[in-house]
Amino acid sequence: MVNWLSAHSLGFPPLARALREPDGLLAAGGDLSPERLISAYRHGCFPWFQAGQPILWWSPDPRMVLFPNELHVSRSLRKAIRQAHFEVSFDRDFAGVIHACAEPRSYADGTWITPAMQASYLELHRRGIAHSVEVWQEGELIGGLYGLAIGRLFFGESMFSRATDASKIGFVTLVEHLRDCGFALIDCQMHTTHLASFGARQISRADFAAYLARHLDQTGPTPWAKDEA
């Protein structure tokens, strides 16, 4: 049975109450206010839904994560990074990145990054919580990704690419910089072979919750203090 959220409370049900089928569905309803989104990530869940559906909140078990010191970069990608004439920046064009991530994909029917979703994450960006990585070529935005940074954890949301290896180069740059700043974990949410190729792996929901408890309120060097990566 799906747990319906109260409009008057930002709380979420215990993660253990998430459904097994579909895997990780924890709750429905509520809103996309910045306050509720922050509460969701701190609790261990995230929004994902299609047009025409209520807002759905997920906490899959297992959870796909990448430990920054376990990043794997293939020899061919490392060579491409050395030879690419790309510029990588942080937080220079968050709106451009999230708009590009919301564009239709050839392999997907519609987008879950609705205008309301974009507006909420833009507000989180203005508050210094949501961040973007941009990849540029001759002044044109050709790739990037965005997510949330809370404590020593980064919660990845979406990425896009308009040129070969563009999003990969942005992702590798981000992970290496987060590693250097002492981040403990990058939340990748769901398993994909693409993320696994970078060294991401699955951990149990209980282990993920333990990382949240340990690192959400930690402080340290901020990766967003410098523009150029």
Image (tube, rainbow, N blue to C red):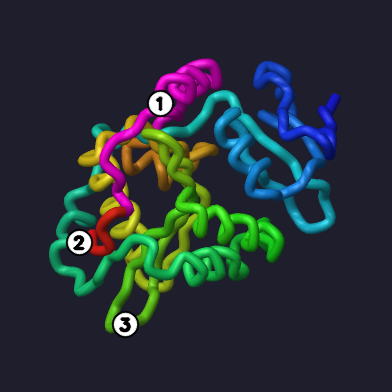
Q: How crowded is mark 3: few (under 14 residues within 10 Å), some or many (20 or more)?
A: few
Of the 4 image quadrants, the one containing the N terminus is: top right
Residue 90 in percent (x, y) is at 34, 61
Q: Which mark sits nearer the N-terminus, 2 or 1?
A: 2
Q: What residue did someone put label 1 on?
A: 215
SS type, badge 1: helix
Answer whether residue 219 is magenta in the image: yes
Q: Is residue 40 left or right of residue 53?
A: left
Q: Look at label 2 and name its amino acid.
A: Ile
First in sequence: mark 3 or mark 2? 2
- Can the viewer see residue 147 in this picture? no
Q: Nearer the viewer, residue 17 or 35?
A: 35
The disc labelled 3 sits on which kind of residue?
Answer: Gly
Alpha carbon distance from label 3 to label 1: 37 Å
Q: Is 93 in the magenta?
A: no
The secondary element bearing badge 2 is classed as helix
Residue under the image location 73 percent in, 19 percent down: 17
Q: Do the residues labelled 2 and 1 touch (CB within 8 Å)?
A: no
- Please give left or right for residue 4 compared with residue 119 in the image: right
**Mark 1 is on which residue type?**
His
Q: Residue at label 3? A: 139
Quadrant into which the C terminus falls: bottom left
Task: Identify the residue at horizontal 41%, vertical 63% (top origin).
Answer: 144
Looking at the rendered image, the disc whose residue lies closer to the viewer, 3 or 1, is 1
Find residue 24 and report its horizontal and vertical position in percent: 67, 29
Badge 3 or badge 1: first in the primary sequence:
3
| In the foreground, 193 or 71 | 71
Magenta span covers which residues? 201-224
